[in-house]
Image (cartoon, grey):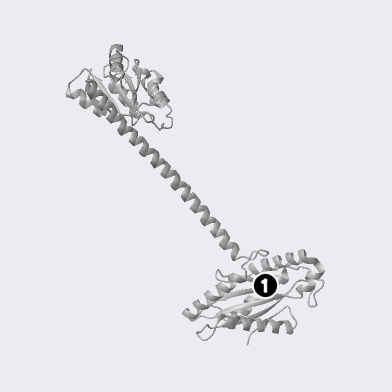
Amino acid sequence: MNADINPENTNADDTKNLAHPIVLLVDDQTMVGEAIRRMLADETDIEFHYCQEPTQAVGKANEIQPTIILQDLVMPDVDGYTLLKFYRRNAATSGTPVIILSSREDPKDKRQAFENGANDYLVKLPDKIELIARIRAHSKSYLLQLQRDEAYREMQKLQEQLTESHKKLEENNAILQQLSTMDGLTGIANRRHFDETLATQWRIGLREKTPLAIIMMDIDFFKKYNDGYGHQGGDDCLKAVAKALSSSLRRPGDFIARYGGEEFVVILPNTDAKGAAEVAEHLRANVQAGNIPHAYSAVASHVSVSLGVASMLPDKTGAPENLIAKADAALYKAKEQGRNRFAIAE
């Protein structure tokens, strides 16, 4: 079989924005080809092409992209029914209208032609007016379909672009949201995020009647550390302490934030003072275990923290600020007692 008619060997080009009828006549009889050419000669907007070899029909159609194919049924090498199947399997001609021009008038032939993909059937030679009318009608319908397909593809492309833009916008918003709640130096939550989380946990404790605890902590003699080791050393110290504190929390609901400067704070939902005291000692011990040198500390040779623990049962007469004040007072008490320890609010 000639490769020109094998649909698996053809590549469909992008559909052109056609504006006029393009006719491809496939017929092995040159007399028929000349007769059809003369019928269309006065129609200046109709572009006419003739292919005498049926084995070259699919290749010719791929080349000129006709808006209508006129074709005989009885031809050498390849019969018209087989050629119809080739058109429909070929991407570039799968939707191209095909009018059969045949000398056969048997209804069975017409039925078989339509079953194999023909769009119309005329007994040749047809009337000139009727042929032109059918060429124009089928071409117009085909061109409109091409325009609809192109519009649909553009709409899909725009939809995909819109979806991608929306996805990127959501990703950027998520990043911005994360950055807005994160401390830029230590990577843990910032003061704003702490305030929001504390308010939320207070409402939960109020609704569920469960205690809420916080632990305020301060790096001992951090100003001296900063002065002695420089600001870069101070920043490295803050990051190391934040990492040690974060790794000390065991429950998913426990929350740590940088409160400001060298101060950190932990929120412990559904935790009483005794439970919070155990967490506080664990936090203190983990920072001590980091063994960060601190030659300027008056309480240890390494970096240490002082912690204030407070726990309350939220009620309508109280507020989260009351819990912060109690923890802050306990922190001050821990510093008075010698630092590198925790104290529990009364």
Is 18 placed above or below 275 here? above
Apparent side of residue 99 relative to residue 56 in the rendered image (left or right): left
Please report the residue visible at 30 percent of the width from the left and 33 percent of the height from the top: 141
Q: Quadrant of residue 345?
A: bottom right
* Observer able to see residue 247: no
Which of 271/242 is in front?
A: 242
Position in image of residue 235 (x %, y %): 73, 65
Apparent side of residue 40 relative to residue 265 in the rendered image (left or right): left
The residue pinned by badge 1 equals 260
* Observer able to see residue 172: yes
Q: Quadrant of residue 264?
A: bottom right
Mark 1 crowd level (few <14, some 14–19, many ≥20, 10 Å Cα) = few
Please report the residue visible at 30 percent of the width from the left and 15 percent of the height from the top: 33
Which of 36/209 is in front?
A: 36
The quarter of the picture where the N terminus appears is: top left
Position in image of residue 92 (x %, y %): 39, 29
Q: How many marks?
A: 1
The quarter of the picture where the C terminus appears is: bottom right
Position in image of residue 306 (x %, y %): 70, 78
Is 146 placed above or below 179 here? above
Judged from the image, the secondary structure of the residue bearing numbered disc 1 is: strand
Q: Quadrant of residue 288?
A: bottom right
Q: Of the residues shown, which amino acid type is indicated by label 1?
A: Gly
Is 16 placed above or below 228 here? above
Which of 10/159 is in front?
A: 159
Please report the residue visible at 56 percent of the width from the left and 70 percent of the height from the top: 251
Position in image of residue 154 (x %, y %): 42, 42
